Amino acid sequence: MYSPIESQQGFNFKPELPTSSSYYRLLKKLRRQVGHAIRDYKMIEEGDKVMVCISGGKDSYTLLDILLNFKRVAPVNFDVIAVNLDQKQPGFPEDVLPAYLEANNIPYYILEKDTYSITKRLTPEGKTYCAVCSRLRRGSLYGFAQEIGATKVALGHHRDDIIATFFLNLFHGGSLKAMPPKLLSSDKKNILIRPLAYVEEKDIIKYAEMRKFPIIPCNLCGSQENLQRAMLNNMLREWDKEYPKRLHSIFGALQNVSPSQLADRDLFDFEKLDEEREFDLKDPEEMKKRLDVVNLGFAAE
Ligand code: SF4
């Protein structure tokens, strides 16, 4: 059994809230960005039961914390419930999340499923576990959301995850797609939301440090982070240092797409352009105007 306040790992599960002005500034910024994302994509509505998937990483702790904070001031009533999938990875400190959630009076479920062994069995020799692992995790969590009647499933992906996914697809997948702030799961049974869609990763890192969340690393399985994703994350960090506005502009571009300026024939009807032209080559009046322009051109020479 776990202690409600401290664990063997030395975490304090209910540390004093920071009092510095920089903490309040950051909290205000995160709350504002989460509020805007929720409003812009109509993520949460009156009576929703939001299941927050919590892994023990900085992103999901921050998501849960800001959503609970937002719930206190939001104009709509909704419930928040934390759910962790214990994947039975060797060495997973299973007391940490329950102790944190209980110490902070947060309703939760721990779902136990040995997806770790299945992942090892299904992953081809020499490949990293992450693809199979996350597919199994998604399946278990989304199924559980239906069992508990959750109307929304909240995931902790942030703005920089969205941008990194966009570049992964651009560089290696041959498609222009990222991670949407809100989507219908592929089996059409769950609405998934990403309330941190406008939040920068560096702010989450700062917030998690200030709040002293009891972070559980996501490499307990011994798997390595996907190499391409790691390289992309480095690239984005470098860009952010050198050109502070660049990531902001890239995310803005994802919200400001011009299908007619790309080349996807399913997205834009290029054939119809001929019908839409407002210039009739057979109209004698139009032809007269055209000849005048040509004549002007000659006159100027
Ligand atoms: S690092 Fe481990 S737990 Fe995290 S997705 Fe990859 S295989 Fe799964």
Image (cartoon, helix red, strand yellow):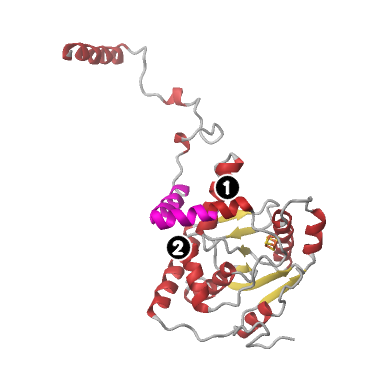
Single out the residue that lies furthest toward the left: 300
- Which quarter of the figure has residue 28? bottom left
Please, what is the three-letter code of the amino acid marked with disc 1? Leu
Q: Position of residue 153 (x, y in %)?
A: 63, 63
Most foreground residue, 81 or 75: 81
Q: Position of residue 259 (x, y in %)?
A: 48, 37
- At x 52%, y 55%, the residue is 234
Q: Which residues are magenta?
A: 233-254
Split into quadrants, the picture shows ligand 1 in the one at bottom right
Please, what is the three-letter code of the amino acid marked with disc 2? His
In the rendered image, is residue 179 in sight? no
In the displayed structure, would residue 230 be above or below residue 146?
A: above
- Magenta-highlighted stretch: main secondary structure? helix
Q: Position of residue 191 (x, y in %)?
A: 62, 58
Of the residues under marks 1 and 2, which one precedes in the sequence? 2
* Distance CA(mark 1)–CA(mark 2): 26 Å
Element type where label 2 sits in the image: helix
Element type where label 1 sits in the image: helix
Q: Is mark 1 within 8 Å of ligand 1?
A: no
Badge 1 crowding class, 10 Å Cα cut-off, few under 14, some 14 to 19, many 20 or more, is: many
Residue 168, labelled with which disc?
1
Residue 9, labelled with which disc?
none
Q: Is residue 122 left or right of residue 178?
A: right
Residue 46 located within the stretch drawn in magenta: no
- At x 53%, y 61%, the residue is 158
Residue 237 located within the stretch drawn in magenta: yes
Most foreground residue, 246 or 38: 246
In the displayed structure, would residue 22 be above or below residue 262?
A: below
- Which quarter of the figure has residue 81? bottom right
Residue 36, labelled with which disc?
2
Tell me the quadrant of the picture where the C terminus can be found.
top left
In the displayed structure, would residue 4 be above or below residue 249?
A: below
